[in-house]
Amino acid sequence: MGKTIRLTAAQAMVRWLAAQLNEEGETYIAGVWAIFGHGNVAGLGEALQPMQDKLPTWRGHNEQTMAHAAIAYAKQMRRNRAMAVTSSIGPGATNMVTAAALAHANRLPVLLIPGDVFANRGPDPVLQQIEDFTDGTVSANDCFRPVSRYFDRISRPEHILTALPRAMRVLTDPADCGPVTLAFCQDVQAEAYDYPESFFEPRVWHQRRIHPDPHELHRAIEVIRAAKRPVIVAGGGVHYSGATEDLRLFAEAHNIPVTETQAGKSALPWDHPLNLGPIGVTGGEPANDRCAEADLILGIGTRFQDFTTGSWGLFRNPDRRIISLNVQAHDAMKHGALPVQADAKAGLTELAIELAGYAPEPPAAGAKPDWFAKVDPLTAAPGDGNALPTDMQVVGAVQRQANDKTVVMCAAGTMPGELHKLWKAGRPGSYHMEYGFSCMGYEIPGAIGIKMAEPEADVICFTGDGTYMMANSEMATAAMMGISFTVVVTDNRGFGCINRLQMGTGGAEFNCLLDHTVHEVPSAIDFAAHAGSMGATSVKVGSIAELEEALAKRGEVKGPYVVVIDTDPYPSTEYGGTWWEVGVPEVSDRPQVHDARAAFVENKKTQRAD
């Protein structure tokens, strides 16, 4: 028998994680976010403390938002590194369930280590324990099962010998990548075991590149060569596989225009002649018009979310075919697509070889200039006047103050749609949007994660007042850690995006904007003062000109910098876009709902199930 070392299960887990490396020789788990409680302070807390030089520990203020920071870090690192997050049992653990769902929807790696109940069951029921009256094996952590790509409960010290490699396999597998939950029984964390020394030898985890199956590749080549008006839909997988340059070369070689999903945006520079820009519900006319008439849609690294496909009403050519090049078979098979299961980079390389000489007519040259002629005035600085600024004007102000290092980010509300349509992303990775789960509260901790991934980046976070109120506690974390980024808070006094959706489906304005809710005392939230109270440098501005002046000073600020501006909740970019299926009531006393329902029925006719 080989040499062994006696460690607690928690000590062994931490030591093992510190020995797992990526292809660049860095620890794959860059660090651990932790809020300690009775379920992890004695075991994991004691194990992490002496390992801070190899596996740093950071303390946040909310388990969900700590996990958001970790997920944003992994996204900005193109999944080449990730972070772990540990919590106590009970509410500390269930706080992370939303973040797990976010990572699951976005195919992003995060290692979640919630404390769990006693494996020996001696003190049951312990503080914060959920008791299932019919199943003694259940704990609150079973909530993680449907939102984890791999779930395990560590109820014996030797379980980590098999659980940890399985967990790392999922975290680093391009096809299965997503959240891993290792529920760690609190008594087991502290129990000792004689672990093989060989278990802790450094290991490099290589990102597997799946190459196309020859049969799938051959069928795809036949379909592409027959296409007269193809279009590419570039998704997040293009970024994660490092295939942005491959996409450019492929598009140029074959005159195929490219459209970009929220996750795929910035795969090509905004001004590249073949980049038709954003697609779908929040897309522009150049991309959507091409998609409506295309006889071939080549999806690369996209999961074809409903915002991308216009609820499957966008691709209207009756003869259209869909090819989905995706590393995950589940995504490659959607809606009758011809699958090419492969890594985006590897797949593009092999497609390019087999398609030598194929070059259909490029898209018409006038579509993009016409589009920008319509939308550029919306982002221009307004003239004198007392009107509240629009969100489009805020986007324009930030764009004018951006630089080559700027990374803009957002997740929910009005700004994702406006940014997708209007933001001009100049380089890959300069646009970071969490729109797989569109989770309010991701923005501020997400900005922390992006800055930790790219310390030299000029990170600018867009957030509305509603999202700010959802989750702002990590502002204090950023201030204490000295992490510098800019937050632009657009205060439209409520949930302006959903209020417009409510109106668009015929509903009366109700319970979205604060003016349309029942409050005894009118809202008067001072966001600048609140951010300042948590350690941020903050300012309230009264115009687009003042916003630009404030943004110009951001390089002088150490730590989070918050700029608040009041905006008009009603206007949005009227150009572009396409139908999005939202259930409209069949029965209502409102004639506006009847009209919306009639439009809904007509739009359903464009929807294809195949």
Image (cartoon, rainbow, N blue to C red):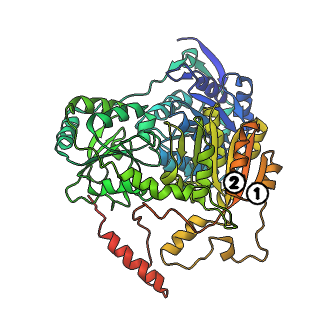
Residue to which mark 2 is pinned: 545
Mark 1 surroundings: few (<14), some (14-19) or many (≥20) residues within 10 A: many
Q: Secondary structure at mark 2?
A: helix
Which label belongs to residue 527? 1
- Residue 551 location (% of width, % of height): 70, 46
From the viewer's perspective, is 135 left or right of 236?
right
Q: Is residue 463 above or below residue 156?
A: below
- Between residue 423 and residue 201, name the one nearer to us: 423
Mark 2 surroundings: few (<14), some (14-19) or many (≥20) residues within 10 A: some
- Residue 176 location (% of width, % of height): 43, 38
Q: Nearer the viewer, mark 1 or mark 2?
A: 2
From the viewer's perspective, is 259 left or right of 219?
right
Amino acid type, mark 2: Ala
Work out which residue is located at the far front of the displayed protein and give it.
384
Answer yes or no: is residue 565 visible. Answer: yes
How many numbered marks have been drawn onto this rendered protein structure?
Answer: 2
